[in-house]
Amino acid sequence: MTDPATTDPVITDDEKDALLDGIATGEVEVHSNNGPSYAEVTPFEVGPRSRLITDSYPRLQGLNRLFASRIDKHVEQLLNVESSVSFDSVQSCTYSDFAEQDRSLSLLFEFAPKPLQGSALISLDSVAVEMLVETFYGGGGGDRIRQDAEFFSPGEITVATLFCNAVLSVTKEVWQPLIELESELLRSHLSTSVIGCIDGADPIINAEFKLTVGDIEHPFHILWPMSVVGPLLPVFEGQKQERDTANDARWQRSLRARIVDSVINISSDVGRTEMTLGEAAELVPGDVISISNPRNSIISAQEVPILEGRFGVHDGRYAVETTRWLEPEITRHNKDQQ
């Protein structure tokens, strides 16, 4: 084994001086087959149009702030005490990195954010669950019932489920301009269990919020796997969703092909007359109402006049023989008369 005290230093004093001199002057000695030469360090400036791409997701942060402002009333109604929710941060990490941040027992609610594919999670640690349960049953929310929780009772899970339902309801409302979410709670897990919907190496977006009840503040998290919200990542970053012209064309062809099979109501207007309200009130079965010009008829599709015709009998049945299509001006005029 070599004695560290007798080994040569990594950088000699002459090399240190040369490096310091090069940093000061911008000249660096470069060795090649042709002997030593000097090169200059070229200054680099970040242009005014350059930008750094980060995972801050400004659009998602805006949605989270709106979510926090709107869920306040839901939490107050659930707990029947003054409370508030604030948005803290958005972080990109793996699920295992998130789990390592706090090794205390947590309750994880798995939900399906349809039409997105896969599952996401709402994370409440044992302190947050106890705060919700104690406050729900009229306590102050600050007393620890169990210092070292190892499980959650059915009653605790029930109260936490009510809170998560409120979270999903407000998320649907806030995300509506972005996507029509129909989220459904699937099941609950302990953080110490193996969760089938997510792997430790899976990248996630961790949205952290703080729930304040009285003077007590504690965080909870919504965990969005990247695989679930992948289609929305460009929008989270502030980009506009571009329309797919090819997809639009397919929709147009499909709609045109199917519209001819649509079922509509056809009705005819045989004639008109006027009566006083008193005369109409005195009508009894068997009375005859005279109609002026009974041979002219207006045919309507879904209550929109489209054709004019003559009323009569065909093959022993009452029928209308169409004579002409109604122009848009005539259609509007007839609707106004109706």
Image (cartoon, rainbow, N blue to C red):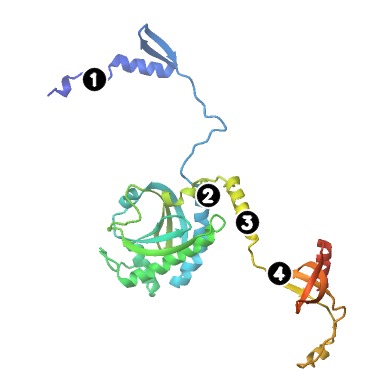
Which secondary structure lies at badge 2?
Answer: helix
Where, quadrant-wise, is the C terminus in this rendering?
Answer: bottom right
Please rate how many residues cluster around mark 2, counting C-alpha atoms within 10 Å: few if below 14, some from 14 to 19, many from 20.
some
Which secondary structure lies at badge 4?
Answer: loop
Residue, x 50% and y 51% (percent of image)?
A: 60
Which of the two labelled residues, at mark 2 and mark 3, occupies the earlier sequence position?
A: 2
Distance from label 1 to label 4 (Cα)?
Answer: 93 Å
Residue, x 78% and y 92% (percent of image)?
A: 286
Q: Which quadrant holds residue 125?
A: bottom left
Please rate how many residues cluster around mark 3, counting C-alpha atoms within 10 Å: few if below 14, some from 14 to 19, many from 20.
few
Three-letter amino acid code at the position of disc 1: Pro
Residue corresponding to mark 4:
302
The reply, left or right, for residue 305 in relation to residue 41 is right
Q: Nearer the viewer, residue 291 or 170?
A: 291
Residue 31 in percent (x, y) is at 36, 11
Mark sitting on residue 257:
3
Three-letter amino acid code at the position of disc 3: Ala
- Between marks 1 and 4 in the image, the one whose residue lies nearer the viewer: 4
- Between marks 2 and 1 in the image, the one whose residue lies nearer the viewer: 2
Distance from label 2 to label 4 (Cα)?
Answer: 43 Å
Q: Nearer the viewer, residue 15 or 275?
A: 275
Q: Nearer the viewer, residue 162 or 114?
A: 114
The reply, left or right, for residue 280 in relation to residue 162 is right
Mark sitting on residue 162:
none
Where, quadrant-wise, is the N terminus in this rendering?
Answer: top left
Three-letter amino acid code at the position of disc 4: Gln
Which of the two labelled residues, at mark 2 and mark 1, occupies the earlier sequence position?
A: 1
Residue corresponding to mark 2:
59
Q: Kindly indicate whether the residue at mark 1 contacts the one at mark 3 (C-beta within 8 angstroms).
A: no
Distance from label 2 to label 3 (Cα)?
Answer: 38 Å
Three-letter amino acid code at the position of disc 2: Arg
Which of the two labelled residues, at mark 3 and mark 1, occupies the earlier sequence position?
A: 1
